[in-house]
Amino acid sequence: QVQLVESGGGLVQAGGSLRLSCAASGHTFPTYDMGWFRQAPGKEREFVATINWSGGSTTYSDSVKGRFTISRDNIKNTVYLQMSSLKPEDTAVYYCAAHPRGRSRWTDWGQGAQVTVSS
């Protein structure tokens, strides 16, 4: 199990950039696959991006592909989400999630970070 704490959220104008960070506790971080999800008001939580334990494989939702980049630093126990060309529809609470390598169910979640994109 890992504890996850997001940071870096805030208010940005459309077209701007923002980087979210998710710091994980414990020594097992390098054995976890990581992901970012988001939930807009009145909508269900949706997948944004994932990165495998080594950082060698990433996936993105179609809505963010080409604009967002997920990365990780296994020395710093941190996963990042670099967001560029932000749109008002990217406004949401962004959550970091983790699951052990080889598993498919997300087992650990952060508390969320608010991202607001103004038009």
Image (cartoon, rainbow, N blue to C red):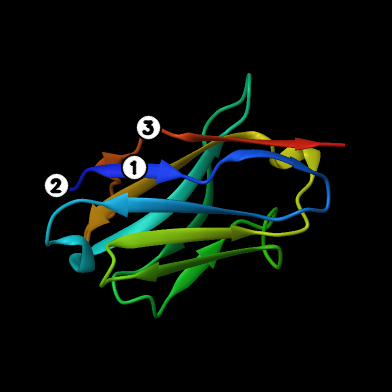
Amino acid type at mark 3: Gln
Position of 63 with respect to 79 (left or right) is right
The residue drawn where x is 25% and y is 72% is 75
Amino acid type at mark 1: Val
The residue drawn where x is 45% and y is 44% is 7
The residue pinned by badge 3 equals 111
Secondary structure state at the residue bearing disc 2: loop
Marks 2 and 1 sit apart, C-alpha to C-alpha, by: 13 Å
Q: Position of residue 48 (x, y in %)?
A: 55, 51
The residue drawn where x is 71% and y is 56% is 17
Q: Position of residue 5 (x, y in %)?
A: 34, 42
Q: Residues within 10 Å of mark 3 (few under 14, many from 20)?
A: some
Q: Position of residue 65 (x, y in %)?
A: 67, 63
N-terminal label among 1 and 3: 1
The residue pinned by badge 1 equals 5
Marks 1 and 3 sit apart, C-alpha to C-alpha, by: 7 Å
The answer to the question of whether label 3 and label 2 lie on touching residues, with beta carbons closer than 8 A, is no
The residue pinned by badge 2 equals 1
The answer to the question of whether label 1 and label 3 lie on touching residues, with beta carbons closer than 8 A, is yes
Q: Quadrant of residue 61?
A: bottom right
